[in-house]
Amino acid sequence: MTETQRKIGFLVCLATIVLAVLDMQIVSAATVPIVRDLDPAHGIDKIPWLVSAFSLASAAVLPLYGKLCDTLGAKQVFLGAVGTFLFGSALCGAAQSIGQLIAARAVQGIGAGGLMSVTMVVIAQLKGPGKEKDSKGAGMGGIVAGGGMALGPWIGGVLSDHASWRWIFYVNLPIGITVLAVSALVLKLPRHTERHRIDFPGAALAAGFSTTLLLVTEWGGKAYDWTSPQVIGVALASAASLALFLRRQKTAAEPILPLSMFRVPELRWGFAIQGLVGAAMVGSMYYVMVYLQVVRSIASSSAGLYLIPMAIGMTVVGVVTGKLTERGWSERTFVITGSAVTAVAFLLLATTGTHTSLWWLRAELLLVGAGFGQLIGQLIQLVQYAAPRHQLGVATTGIRFFQTLGTALGAALFGTLISRLSDGTDMPSYVSAMDAVFLCGAALMGLGVVLALRLPKAGPASSERVPAPVPVGN
């Protein structure tokens, strides 16, 4: 590929990440218009499944996407994921009932699971041999993802207030079709010619584990009591799926998630830290939005604007740390400092009260973004740099998989704290419960500092890396 083609490829990848992240966040601001239009009488009870169907489908296919990249080549898998996502988006926009919309969101989620993870594989391969430390790509991809998470609710609110909720989905089509056309013409990535077997039973078990685990976090304490037969049954199914999955990975000829990867310290601790980041991030964004709307009576579209400082912090600090790592600074350094800064920011958020200055809150969120900005891009780059080249796809989707699981578990933990520590009517008790959430987030990121200190100070030896396959016309 020429340098111009590589630059176009990077821009296409960033646009794809924006599509993926916005669709994870944007629907939350449009739930009321959707219910009013499709099912004003009973739709409110089904609204949680609009988010759950998307996240369940996305998490279920993540391990399979990684293996397909390492087996078939990233370009084919990338085009397939984008095409599936666009098909699901069109179905969502045309849905005539809540049930149809939930099913379409599942289709969209299957594609979205590949948009984020496979795009990161494409970015890594676009760098070319000998450019692993190039700050473009994985770092900027992570920052764009973080910014999209922060801005998604605001964009959803604007579209819902000034246009039909269907445009939340239809807006994906022109952007996605452009991505498909440009990618098909420009991208020339390594293609594997050797025959490989895909561990479909392992992929099914991984999907079963992630789906049942997410159902536990979605149902527990909300639809059903934590001790109810439904939640206990799904939890047992999740544990059984995990045990069978681990056993399968030990015996499969070509496992979907090779357990040997966990012998690499950067992968082992990187996956764990990314899970903590996922849990902490959902706590910062979701409960800050709840605080602004419930405690300070700020409209949803206006409340979303308060996340802009967080997005600015992510972007500015992420770009700076990316440039510094390109000049020889260690990713390990920024994973440590990023975890520490985020922990301090959460401690400050825990002091938020009913009359806290909203400018002070903006400053706290700016600090949160500065911490996450060091973590999101650097963790991806750390994992990609340490992974054997023939397992690049599995390693990249693996870090996204652990973030998804961390987000689900964090949401369950924080939701339980809120329900147990507040009585639902007394505002000070609700604020105290949210302070407990932020203290818990600080503890999680403090654990992140401990794990980051266990990362090797020097990068992996070159002998540990398997040479990349030779590119052919693709």
Image: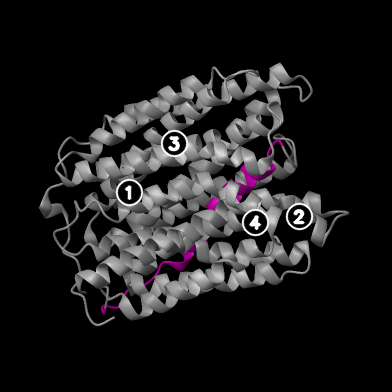
Q: Position of residue 75 (x, y in %)?
A: 35, 73
Name the residue beneath numbered marker 2.
33
Circle 3 or circle 1, nearest the eye: 1
The secondary element bearing badge 3 is classed as helix
Rendered-image quadrant of the N terminus: bottom left
Q: Amino acid at mark 1?
A: Ile
The secondary element bearing badge 4 is classed as helix
Q: Which mark is residue 276?
A: 3
First in sequence, mark 3 or 4: give its number: 4
Instruction: Left or right? Give the position of 442 relative to 142.
Output: right
Is 202 above or below relative to 178? above
Is 443 above or below relative to 399? above
| Viewer-closest of 399 and 161 | 161
Q: Position of residue 365 (x, y in %)?
A: 48, 31
Q: Does the residue at mark 2 contact the one at mark 3 (Cβ under 8 Å)? A: no
Q: Which mark is residue 159?
A: 4
Q: Amino acid at mark 3?
A: Leu
Q: CA distance from mark 4 to mark 2?
A: 11 Å
Query: Magenta segment: does it hold 348?
Result: no
- Dominant secondary structure (helix, strand or loop) of the stretch shown in magenta: helix
Question: Magenta residues?
Answer: 193-221
